[in-house]
Image: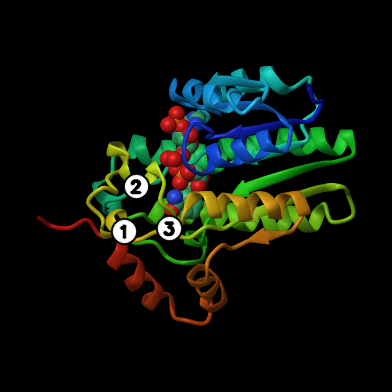
Amino acid sequence: MTDKLAVVTGASSGLGYQFARLAAQDGYDLVLVADEDEVHVAADKLRRLGANVEAIVADLSTRSGVAEFWTFIEDRRIDFFAANAGRALGEAFHDQNWSDVKRLIDLNILQTTSLLYKVGQKMHADGEGRILVTGSIGGFVPGPFDAVYDATKAYLNSLCYALQDEWKDSDVTLTCLMPGPTETPIFHRSENELEEAPISEADKQDPVKVAEQGYAAAMRGDMRAIPGFFSKVITMFSGVVPDSVLAKLHRQGAEPSKE
Ligand SMILES: NC(=O)c1ccc[n+]([C@@H]2O[C@H](COP(=O)([O-])OP(=O)(O)OC[C@H]3O[C@@H](n4cnc5c(N)ncnc54)[C@H](OP(=O)(O)O)[C@@H]3O)[C@@H](O)[C@H]2O)c1
C-alpha cells in the first residue's frame, strides 16, 4: 500500500485511462471518475495491475455531480490530479442542440475550472502537488464544425498559462497537455456527431504515446506537452498563419460528409 494518491477525471477510456494506468504503474493509489458505469471496468483492469483503485460515477458537467465527487476526495491529500474529462461536439453550430452545447461548456470549462480551483487550493495548503490538464491544439485554431469545443480548449490552455505563472514560486505544478487528433473513443461517440467527420477515419496519434508524454511532463513539472511534430507546427504558426487559413484546414477534417 502506498500513500500517494492520483485522481483522474474521465478515466474510463482514452487518455484518462492511460494516465490512470501510468499512475498505477508508478505506485499511486487511484480515484477514477467518469459519467458512466464503464469506469468500474477500467478500475477492475487497473486493480489487476496491482493498484488500489476506487471508481466513482458522477456527471462532472453538473454542480451536483462535482459536489458528489468532491466528497470522496476533499479530506484526502491529492498528489496528482488529471483534469481530463471532456466532450466534443461536431456539426454546424446552428444545428446543435443548445442543451448539448451548454453541457459541453459546463463540463470543459465551468466544472473543470471549479475542480481546478478546489484542487489548487488543497495542494497549496498541502505545499505541493502535480496537476495535468488536458487542453488541446484545438485551442490554437478556429474550429468550424467543432467550434465550441475548440473555444473551450482555448480557454483551458489560457487558464493553464496564467496559473503556471501565478504558481511559479510554489511546489504546485500545472502541466498543460495539448494533443492533436488522437485515436480515442471521443471520435466515435454517437452523441457528438463526429462520426461523420473525415477526422474520425483519418490516421491519428497513439493515445498511449500521447498520454505517456503528458504524464512524464507532469511528473517533471513541465509547463506544457505538445506530442507530435504536426501539433508542434500548429502551435508555432497559429498567430502567424491567418485564422481564415487555419479555419479552412479545420473544416476539411471536421465538416460532416454530406452523404
Ligand atoms: N482524442 C483527441 O483527439 C483529443 C485531442 C485533444 C484533446 N483531447 C481531450 O482529451 C480528453 C480525454 O478525451 P479522450 O480523447 O480520451 O476521449 P474519451 O475516450 O471519450 O474520454 C472522455 C472521458 O471523459 C469522460 N466524461 C465525458 N463526459 C463526462 C461527464 N459529464 N462527467 C464525467 N466524465 C465525463 C468520459 O466518461 P464517460 O464515457 O463515462 O462519459 C471518458 O472517460 C478530453 O478533455 C478531450 O477534449 C482529446
Dot 1 alpha-carbon crowd within 10 angstroms: few under 14, some 14 to 19, many 20 or more:
many
> Do we see residue 240 in this rendering?
yes
> Which amino acid, by three-letter code, is at mark 1?
Ile
Q: Is residue 211 left or right of residue 194?
A: right
Spot occupied by residue 44 in the image (x, y as percentages of width and height): 53, 21
- View extreme (left): residue: 259
The residue wearing badge 3 is 181
Local secondary structure at mark 1: helix
The residue wearing badge 1 is 199
Dot 2 alpha-carbon crowd within 10 angstroms: few under 14, some 14 to 19, many 20 or more:
many
> Which amino acid, by three-letter code, is at mark 3?
Pro
Say the numbered circle drawn on residue 187.
2
Spot occupied by residue 51 in the image (x, y as percentages of width and height): 66, 25
Dot 3 alpha-carbon crowd within 10 angstroms: few under 14, some 14 to 19, many 20 or more:
many
Q: CA distance from mark 2 to mark 1?
A: 8 Å
Q: Say if mark 2 contacts mark 1, CB within 8 Å.
A: yes
Q: CA distance from mark 3 to mark 1?
A: 8 Å
